[in-house]
Image (cartoon, rainbow, N blue to C red):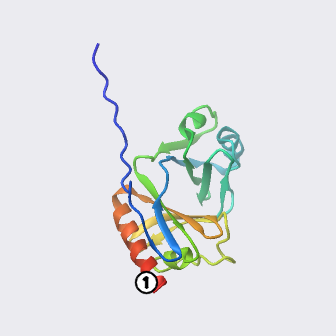
Amino acid sequence: MADIAHATRIEPLAGRVGGAAGVALAPAAPANRVSLRADPKDAKALSKALGLELPMSPKTSARNDKGRLAAWLGPDEWLVIDENGNPMADLAKVKVLHSAADVSHRNTAIVVTGKGARSTLQSGCPQNLSDKVFPVGSATRTVMGKIEVVIIRTGETEFRVECWRSFSDYAFDMLSEAARDCLA
């Protein structure tokens, strides 16, 4: 019988740390990610399978107590992130028409925390990330510098920046420099 080789995904930002006084940058924990597309009328069945209510309003996200997060990206599009489970397996059981593409290999994330987190992000992002417009639980697809990102506000002073792996060094370096500039 032949030996089976198993690939181990190497996180592109593993071991990197950054920031400045009042801002910390760190790679997010490894996660499974799914780009989910479906008719909004089928969201209830998909939500049941995922164990969380898919957000149905622009710039919103939903989280369950098991580490699963879903961000609204469009009227029929969500990004599902799970650090502990396998959303693809859960979605495979759903009978409603939907498209679920595993994008775990494509994306990675940077967690930006601290009192200067918003200023750090705002230095390269045109979105208004103020408390009034972008409260905890908000999510948006936008640009940061020259790349597309998804920003999710996960806490009062915490943001998750999802980006493509191929742009992760650029994003981390840009945020590191912005952190130093914002607090200088």
Residue lying at the far front of the rendered structure: 21
- Point 66% across, 38% down: residue: 49
Q: Position of residue 133 (x, y in %)?
A: 66, 76
184 relative to 114, above or below: below
Q: Position of residue 144 (x, y in %)?
A: 44, 72
178 relative to 107, above or below: below
Which residue carries the number 1 mark? 181
- Point 47% across, 48% down: residue: 30
Relative placement, left or right, of 28 versus 49 is left
Q: Quick one: SS at disc 1?
A: helix
79 relative to 92, above or below: below
User: What amino acid is labelled 1 in the image?
Assistant: Asp
Q: Position of residue 65 (x, y in %)?
A: 69, 47
Residue lying at the far left of the rendered structure: 2
- Point 67% across, 76% down: residue: 131
Q: Which quadrant is home to the C terminus? A: bottom left
Relative placement, left or right, of 94 versus 161 is right
Crowding at label 1, few (<14), some or many (≥20) Cα neighbours within 10 Å? few
The answer to which of 37 and 4 lies nearer the viewer is 4
Q: Which quadrant is home to the N terminus? A: top left
The answer to which of 25 and 48 lies nearer the viewer is 25
Residue lying at the far top of the rendered structure: 1
- Point 43% across, 72% down: residue: 175
Find residue 132 and report its image quarter: bottom right
